Image (cartoon, rainbow, N blue to C red):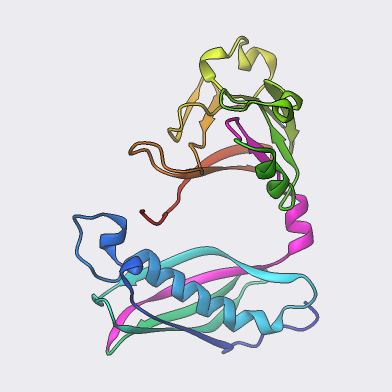
Amino acid sequence: MAKPIPIGARGDARETVEFKHTLTAHHAELPPVYSTPDMIRLMETAAFLALHPYCEGDEITVGTSINIQHRAASGIGAHVRAEAVLESFDGRFYTLRVVARDVQEIGRGTVARAVVSIGKFVEKMHIIHAGDVGSPQILEKLTTIAPVAAVRGNIDKGAWSHKLPETEVLELGGISIYVLHDLAQLDLKPKAAGFAVVVSGHSHIPKQETRDGVLYFNPGSAGPRRFKLPVSVGKLIVEDGRVRGELVLLRVNQS
């Protein structure tokens, strides 16, 4: 970024509350009012728009923290506007004051963002697929996002799947990761073999637990919903030689 972003830089974002934005869309037993995650999304959009005009080249800003209060309900049809104003910059993080309103203030707080280079950011990304890929086209699409390591699952049939190994070993950021489809088929002792993480799939149930110093991580499934299981992905975050996992539940339209 060639020049600093001025304190007071502003952005706003607007939307009309639809059913997909309501608590009911998340959980059928909850009332049809504007959900907190959707309000925060609109606030983050306003913050992004406040800073984006000052980015250059392949720079963008990404959210790093939020501190938000949701103070009043908004129903379907309400017109919500979120405003963001840059308050401070500590040399790394930009902190913005955000407010959301319909006919009254419904939420307020602060969000923080940082400037990143998309190119440098993607260089640090890696996609791991623990099997049940379904088709080679899935892998082709994933490789347009980041390098992919994939193993063969029990539904992967045909000549294309023969190229997929049953297990894979990765070394990312100094962390050794062992990948297989079915955890029940694990035939080694990960800690003794030097692995910090074991990634598996098969069950389609998102789960993570640490046993004997090893993180066992199942991201679940991002494909079509099976039975009543959640649709999910997982993130492994490697920092300073340590790894932690995050499970992310995806909201999908019900058919």
Q: Quadrant of residue 19?
A: bottom left
Question: Was residue 69 drawn as part of the magenta stretch in this picture?
Answer: no
| Front residue (pair 178, 96) | 178
| Horizontal relation, residue 82 to residue 77: left or right | right
Q: Is residue 119 above or below residue 123?
A: below
| Horizontal relation, residue 200 to residue 19: left or right | right
Rendered residue at 56%/39% (across/down): 244
Rendered residue at 54%/82% (across/down): 87
Q: If the image is split into quadrants, where does the N terminus sit?
A: bottom right
Q: Position of residue 48 (x, y in %)?
A: 58, 76
Q: Quadrant of residue 11?
A: bottom right
What span is colored magenta in the figure?
Answer: 104-133
Q: Is residue 131 visible?
A: yes
| Front residue (pair 145, 227) | 227
Q: Position of residue 34 (x, y in %)?
A: 30, 71
Question: Was residue 129 drawn as part of the magenta stretch in this picture?
Answer: yes
Rendered residue at 50%/72% (across/down): 44
Q: Position of residue 39 (x, y in %)?
A: 38, 72
Rendered residue at 48%/36% (across/down): 220
Q: Position of residue 241 (x, y in %)?
A: 69, 37
Furthest-front residue in this view: 158
Q: Is residue 211 above or below residue 255?
A: above
Picture mark count: 0
| Front residue (pair 22, 84) | 22
Q: Is residue 247 visible?
A: no
